[in-house]
Image (tube, rainbow, N blue to C red):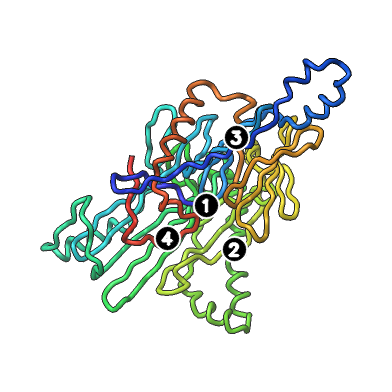
Amino acid sequence: MTPFRRPSNRSARGRVQRVLISGRRWGFCALLGSSFGVACADRAADRPPPAEFIIAAGDSTYWVRSTPAGIKLRGSPMVLARLDGQFRELYVVDDDRSYEDALFVGQRLFQRDLVSGDSIEIYRDTLISSMADAYARSHPEARRLAPDEESGEEPASTATAEVSVLGVHGPFLSVEYHADTSGSGDESWHMTRHGVVDLRTARQASLADILGPGDASTVLARARKLFQETVDSIRRDRRATAQRAARSLGRFRFDPSSFALAAPNGTLMIAFSAPGQGTGGEGFTLPMRPIPVNEPSWWADARGALPTSTREREEQWARGTYVVKAIYDTIVRPVHLMLADSSAHEFQIGAVSAPVHRIYWIDNPPLDRAQRAALTRAFDEAAQYDAAARAALRPPLSPARVALRR
């Protein structure tokens, strides 16, 4: 899930998806007399229940509003988080420090309060900027490119990085950082690591910040043991693929700060991944089995956005008088959304990107006027975002990508 870049004046204009599934109006029933009461009651079942919520799915956000007149689904290419009842947009800006014959493009991750419009930097790439500074010192004659100036088609060296959102759980944002470099002779080098940012402080969060010192110490000891078990298991595996992987194990190191939050079936877990660096597959991460943990106090609020039940190819969110269902098709990528009322009558909402990450409820308590206006404005603005920036996967950043700026 990649936060979207703000559009520059060179970006193509994207298009917001709007789907309106109209319900039937049966207002004439009241005029027909009591003899038609049963028929009118049956027809009333065709009215969807009142509901309103925000869905985070794939690399997009969807606003669903259900009334007796029908269901409206509005999609937008942005990533939202919710903190203390306030929506924040997450977006990245490219930090371009390129020269005529050297490409240096890092990224910075921001959160923007939708009501005030204020943005705060929450994650900054320092590797690429330090490489650009080193290049400038060793090439004092090199000319720095202007912001709107294109680099050469085949620069002698490149260094790019990309920051991607892995998940949002309450006030904590899990991210992946991936860097790629190449030089003369087509030599390439890669590095990947994970981390968690506290949206309240805009700083990287430690395990103790998330779980408390006592539980963090216990989980960290378990993670170190899991890392060694994972390494030993790979080394014992005699298959050719495992043996190739075993030769790269020296490139991975256990790092207590390289982890992300996960919540399969609504259970909080810590997913450690040993960061790697090298010229091949060792430039990614060595994942370990997620560790279930005691739920901290903040988790109760975060869990409200997660499914209340999970079945094969289906997730459900029970919400008072209605249920939201996400149905996963093994052939077609989009997820089909359904809304069911208290009598189990189902109404089609539409299709969204896969997977559905979380649902933010905005009908109970309802949005205040300022939040509703801000959310509407954010959806309208996102309609102008570059459609090319909707990458749901996390490929290496190409030189052709342009920063989407405010």
Q: CA distance from mark 1 to mark 4?
A: 12 Å
Q: CA distance from mark 2 to mark 4?
A: 18 Å
Q: Position of residue 383 (x, y in %)?
A: 43, 40
Pointer 1 and pointer 2: residues touching (CB < 8 Å)? Answer: no
Name the residue carrying label 1.
166
Pick whichever, 271 or 304, lies toward us: 304
Assign a secondary structure to mark 1.
strand
Q: Amino acid at mark 4?
A: His
Disc number lying in front (3 or 4): 3
Is 47 left or right of 397, judged from the image as shown? Answer: right
Decide which of tag 1 and tag 3 comes sooner along the chain. Answer: 3
Residue beneath the point at 18% across and 60% down: 136
Name the residue carrying label 4.
178
Name the residue carrying label 3.
72
In this view of the protein, can residue 205 be seen by the observer?
A: yes
**Quadrant of the image containing the C terminus:** top left
Name the residue carrying label 2.
288
Pointer 3 and pointer 2: residues touching (CB < 8 Å)? Answer: no
Please tell me whether residue 386 is drawn above or below residue 180 in the rendered image: above
Pick whichever, 134 or 161, lies toward us: 161
Residue lying at the far front of the rendered structure: 32
Residue lying at the far left of the rendered structure: 141
Assign a secondary structure to mark 2.
loop
Label placed on residue 92: none
Mark 4 closeness class: few <14, some 14–19, many ≥20 residues within 10 Å: many
